[in-house]
Amino acid sequence: MVLNEEELNVIAHADAVFIHFWAGCFHQVLDAKKKYHFKLAVDFDVYRDFDDMEQYAPYIDYFMISGEESLLYHFEGFSKKYDGLFNMSLAERGSVTYFRGKCYRVPASKVEHVIDTTGCGDSYHARFVCEHLIHGEIVEAMKKNIETEPLARIDYVKAVDGLTMQQIKKVQKPMLVAMAVYIGKTRLIDNTIWD
């Protein structure tokens, strides 16, 4: 896929762009990032050429990859050299994000059945990442994302310091993110600790 002028114009005026590394227009989007300086999130999926990836590191604000623990040292190293967020999904073992050399680990929640035939998890993730890149506030990014679901009604969304329990706006360690959201009549509650 090659982007036409109209599509490139939309990207040039975007606050944030989320793209898959395998997309045929990846290099066009990367060139546009260099020129227009929007926030860029890239999903590298199962790509494993870390030397090749590093050439893009100065231009990408949020790296994502599916991987395993043995590959984490690559992202830890990148995070010490470049300003972006480097996130690795570890499937049933959760995920790890490195930022400026600090490690943020989130364990996976145990569930009996996982059903995501629509890709809605990827869509949620993309929107959350873009909102967070634009505004820099984790709670606002979560709220904006939840509000896109017509059946959702937010009871609360909070991010607090993991030691003092004082509300915070930026990601830090340790922290607790807690939310309660109604989907129709069902109240969903989730708490995640980053330490």
Image: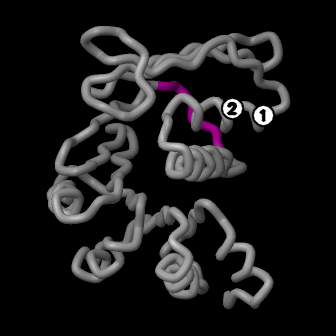
* Numbered-mark total: 2
Q: Amino acid at mark 2?
A: Ile
| Stretch in magenta | 111-116
- Quadrant containing the C terminus is top left
Q: Where residue 68 appears, x then y in whole percent?
A: 26, 53
Q: Residue 79 appears in which quarter of the rendering?
A: bottom left
Residue beneath label 1, please?
Answer: 149
Q: Which residue lies at the image location 53% right of the left edge and 49% below the top edge?
A: 129
Q: Residues within 10 Å of mark 1 (few under 14, many from 20)?
A: few
Q: Nearer the viewer, residue 129 or 189?
A: 129
Q: Amino acid at mark 1?
A: Glu
Residues marked 1 and 2 touching at CB (< 8 Å): yes
Residue beneath label 2, please?
Answer: 146
Q: Which residue lies at the image location 64% right of the left edge and 30% below the top edge?
A: 143
SS under mark 1: loop
Give me the C-alpha separation between circle 1 and circle 2.
Answer: 6 Å
Q: Which residue lies at the image location 62% right of the left edge and 49% below the top edge?
A: 127
Residue 68 highlighted magenta (yes or no): no
Left or right, residue 118 beside residue 48 = right
Q: Which residue lies at the image location 57% right of the left edge and 63% below the top edge?
A: 18
Left or right, residue 119 beside residue 191 = right
Q: Where residue 178 appears, x then y in whole percent?
A: 49, 17
Does residue 113 sit above or below 176 in this rendering?
Answer: below
- Quadrant containing the N terminus is bottom right
